[in-house]
Amino acid sequence: MKKQINITPSTASKIGTVDFDNLTFGSTFTDHMFVCDFRDGHWDIPKIVPFGTMELSPASSVLHYGQAVFEGMKAFKDDHGSIWLFRPNENASRLNKSAERLAIPAFPEDIFLEGLKSLITLDKEWVKSGDGKSLYVRPFVFASEACVQASASREYRFMVICAPVKSYYGGDVRVKIADHYSRAAQGGTGYAKAAGNYGGQFYPTQLAKDEGYQQIIWTDAASHEYIEEAGTMNLFFRIGDTLITAPTSDSILDGVTRKSILAIAQQMGIHTEVRMLKVSELIEAKKSGELLEIFGCGTAVVVQPIIGFGYKGNNYDTPLLENSYAQKLKDALVNIQCNKSKDPFGWRFKVCD
Ligand code: COI
């Protein structure tokens, strides 16, 4: 049964003003947004309205205590004009895992999926095909109650906004391995897509950028000896012919792209290991010539080769390989996402024709 969603279409599309070949990631938005409020203990009837600013009390709880979680997904247009989401049920359930950790009420997963379908269908002209183009879909929930008591809000707003995008990073990516700052600790919120996990990275990342790196490889907060993730990406290391990634934990995001890459690699017959990797082991592998590739992966970045890393003042290069695992895995993933190959795992979700 179709869920009720009240739709107010926009009267004038902005699409004619957009240069789809020159987009800064996440800064141009489509014509509509999905909105659903939680109050008096339940979610109201959702609506889709023209994209625009909204009124918010300066006392809104999110502005004071950061009670907010989000998701990142992409919609793709295939060569026949049909539009697909990639594993949206994974995002629906992860949103609610994140929400639980932040004491935010769960959002019904069937309305999440129905809302995405209606919103993306309404804005389907914004989904372009080819050349790495896609529609980045950003669901999020924040505490909207006007109250500065330091306790869980009694009111929330769930929203979805969409941005046409191309690539996330403009050029080469070098990373700094953290030896002082931490992203997440045991028992903390690191596994959740909590807004604060990202805000807390901006200052150390800015310092790393000043040193010529684009991102930080976060290490465990207790010892800084074990590699975790990179904040906007999960990480893979190719040592010899083995592809290694850290197990998900309290402090590592359970990335949808990460688990998809693992499944594709295993299907291709690549030997994979899901285990903690010590920084010292990485540096030993680099020195012995066994470290062949490092790449990050995530919805926004897809698969991003990392061409070098810095650690405690030393720099190590990991130049791009021909026939890299990164490229093979990216091609296989993107072909599934864009309906250019079979979908042996059943990951594609049809939005509309
Ligand atoms: C994503 O890959 O969707 C993310 O959430 C990373 C992001 C903060 C841009």
Image: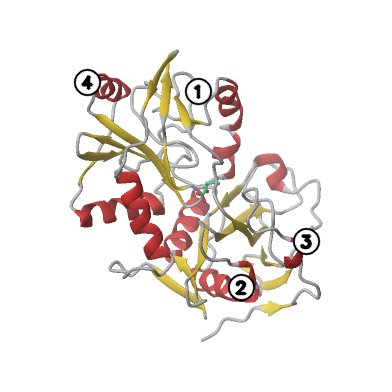
Q: Nearer the viewer, residue 288 or 108?
A: 288
Q: Nearer the viewer, mark 1 or mark 3?
A: 3
What residue type is disc 1 on?
Answer: Tyr
* Disc number placed over residue 181 in the picture, else none: 1
Category of crowding for the residue at label 3, using alpha-carbon neighbours closer than 10 angstroms: few (below 14), some (14–19), many (at least 20): few
For this orientation, the residue located farthest to the bottom is 1
Q: Secondary structure at mark 3?
A: loop
What residue is pinned by disc 4?
A: 288
Tag 4 and tag 1, C-beta contact below 8 Å: no
Where is residue 86? Give x, y as percent.
44, 64
Residue visible at 47% across and 71% down? 78
Q: Position of residue 200 (x, y in %)?
A: 58, 33
> Residue 47: percent from the left, percent from the top?
69, 73
Sequence-first tag of 3 and 4? 3
State the CA–CA distance, disc 1 to disc 3.
Answer: 37 Å
> Mark 2–mark 1 contact, CB under 8 Å?
no
Q: Is residue 50 above or below residue 287?
A: below
Mark nearer the viewer, 2 or 3: 2
* Mark 2 → mark 3, Cα distance in angstroms: 18 Å
Q: Position of residue 52 (x, y in %)?
A: 78, 61
Dot 1 alpha-carbon crowd within 10 angstroms: few under 14, some 14 to 19, many 20 or more: some
Q: Which residue is mark 2?
A: 124
Residues at marks 4 and 2, CA–CA distance in whole angstroms: 50 Å
Mark 3: which amino acid? Gly
Mark 2 crowd level (few <14, some 14–19, many ≥20, 10 Å Cα): many
Which disc number belongs to residue 106? Answer: none
The earlier-in-sequence mark between 2 and 3 is 3
Viewer-nearest of discs 4 and 1: 4
Colouring style: secondary structure
Quadrant of res 248: top left
Residue linked to disc 3: 52
Q: CA distance from mark 4 to mark 1?
A: 28 Å
